Structure formats: C-alpha cells, structure tokens
Image: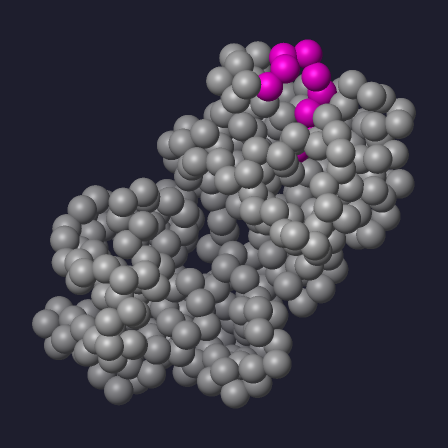
Amino acid sequence: MGRDLVARPYGRFFYLPHYLAERGHEVCSLLLDYKPAASLDTRQHGIRWVCESLAYRGPGKYLGKLKQLIHETGPDWIIGFSDTYFGILAERFARKSGIRCCIDAYDNYESYIPWMKPLHLLWRRALSGADLVTAVGPDLADYLSMQRPGRPAVVIPMAADPVGFRPMDRIECRRRMNLPPGRKFVGYCGALHKNRGIEVLFQAFDLLHHRDPEVSLLLSGRSWKNVPLPGSACSLGYVQDDLMTTLLNCMDVLTVINRATVFGNYSYPVKLYEAMCCQIPVVATETPATRWILRDYPEFLVPPAQPDVLCDRIEQNLKAGRVDYGHIPDWNSACGSFEKALLASM
C-alpha cells in the first residue's frame, strides 16, 4: 500500500492496525509507494508510518528499511498485508530474524497472475511457514489452510469503514449527486471489466428497462474500452471516497456482480458490507463468498450468468425499500478477533 493510506485512511490495511494501536499495541506500518515520492516517516492515528518509493533504487531501499525497522523495534510479529509479495517477504524476514509471522489475505492472490507459477510456489511456502494465517472469509481460509495441515487459517471478516456508511435521505442524496429524484436507480460500483461478468448485468438491465422505462442503471468506477455501456446508463466514473455513502443512498438496489471463478469464489466484496450499513437492498451473484456474507438473506442471491433471473430479482428488490440487516461486522470487532488470534499464537 502507498502513502495514500496515511492521507486518506480506509479499509482493512488502515483499520486493523489502527484498532490494534488503540488497544495499546505498538504498531509500525511499512508502506511501498509505486509512484515517485520522498521517503516518509511519521506518526499519525497512533501508528508509525514509514514509506519508501519503488521508483527510487527499486525494491532495495524498501528491503533495507524493513531490515532497519526489525533491528530498531524488535517486533513480536511481522504481518504481511495486501498482496502475495508482502506475505512472502513477511515470512522470509520473520524466519531469518526469529520473529513470529502472520499473513493476512483478502483475496485469492493466485488468481491475479495465474501463469506465474514460481511466485505461487513461494506464496504457498510462505503460508506453510507462517505462524498465523488470516483470511476474510471461511472459503478463502479453507483454501489457504490446504498449505498448512492441522493449522487452519482464522477468519477476520471485511467491514465497512466506520465513517459515514449509514442510511441517509434518498432525495437529498440525489440532489447532491445531481440525479433526478423520481427515478428508480439500480446501482453498480466498481471496475466495469469483463472478468467480473458485467455483461450479465447489462443484459439483465436491458430486460428490466423494457419492462419499466422508469428504471435507470447508475454506474461508478473505471470504464474499459472493450465494455460498451447501455445507452440509458448513467456513468459517474470515479467517485471520491467522501461521496460513496451519498452515492449508495441514491440507489434503490445495489448489484454486486461476479463470476464463479478462482477469483470470484473467494471475493468478499466490501461494497456489500457498505450497502448493508446503508440498509440498501442488494442483489449479488451467488458464490461461496457472497453466500456466506448474505447467509441470512439468501433471497438476495442469484446464480451466475443468468440475466433473466438477475432481472427478476432486481425487479423484486426495487420494491423492498430499506432493509435492516441486523448485526453487521465492523472493524473494531474484526480487530478484536485479529488481536485474539495473534495473542493465541504466541
């Protein structure tokens, strides 16, 4: 993760360390910036943030800083967050230094670059050698546990960020986003890429739009040239973080679309958690991951690659109004589980 994590705190890689620090632990987060930037060493939010840029001297300066921090602080744990490379580095440096290692995974990283077999082999060795492995959901945890028989990975779920995600007045939110107050909006947030099966949503929306011309498709996220958008779609492009709650509250239904693949089956979308906090009805492609998140709401799931079923379910949920999802995981409770797993492994 780059220094943007310090400038605009968000997500798993900020809030788990943040709440650990609030609980009295000394936390240092070493970040790798992919853009040219000066080195950073500062203390904010109870955490020491150190950042090196990949643009200067390649990875050498980052690795040197990691060695220096280990020598200076003598940590109890080295935790690899956010990608294959950092899990591998965490396990290797921890083993050399005689320090405990935790690897945390929020996706099936092997699905990112499936042809890079040597990297996957190093990743699996790191999982096997780590003292603790944590994952965002049970199916991903089971998959990672295959590399460490008898030492199962621990589930630390995703959550919506604690700032802002709540039900808000829909008319006022649409006014802020310059959207017509009387339309019905079916929303989608995220990259408009074919590897997610986005064309299934577009096919379903075409069917729905023929039934009810008052329904509009509201999109946010990066567009791809090879993905033509429906003519009636309203695409907002990239939406700033501080407007995401407003955008979600503009929607009558949020759709979360994926494919049943080695990526999709282990993807636990944070947008689901955010929409649930806003009490927005959702319709999600059924995968092992979404089935677990919506285990109390199976009526919000649809089978992959069936636009007619997706259309029917969206139409039904347009009538749902607000949905009280009951207890929804938050980062503080997730950190409590994370802290408990760390302490139990010492």
Question: Residue 326 occupies which quadrant of the picture?
Answer: top right
Q: Is residue 296 above or below residue 267?
A: above
On-image quarter of the C terminus: bottom left
Q: Is residue 8 left or right of residue 104?
A: left
Magenta stretch containing residue 249, yes or no? no
Report the residue at 62% width, 34% height from top.
235
Residue 251, image x and y in percent?
A: 63, 25
* Total numbered circles: 0
Asked whether the viewer can see residue 168, the reply is no
Q: Is residue 82 left or right of residue 27?
A: right
Report the residue at 43% width, 36% height from top.
240
Which stretch did the figure color magenta? 179-187
- Please name whichever residue, 274 or 227, is drawn nearer the observer in this view of the structure: 227
Report the residue at 49% width, 49% height from top.
158
Residue 18, image x and y in percent?
A: 28, 48
Q: Is residue 146 left or right of residue 133?
A: right
Report the residue at 60% width, 56% height from top.
267
On-image quarter of the N terminus: bottom left
Q: Is residue 213 left or right of residue 1?
A: right
Residue 48, image x and y in percent?
A: 17, 55
- Please name whichever residue, 71 or 254, is drawn nearer the observer in this view of the structure: 254
Residue 186, image x and y in percent?
A: 70, 30
Question: Residue 280 occupies which quadrant of the picture?
Answer: top right
Q: Is residue 19 above or below residue 220?
A: below
- Please name whichever residue, 132 or 70, is drawn nearer the observer in this view of the structure: 70
Question: Residue 344 occupies which quadrant of the picture?
Answer: bottom left
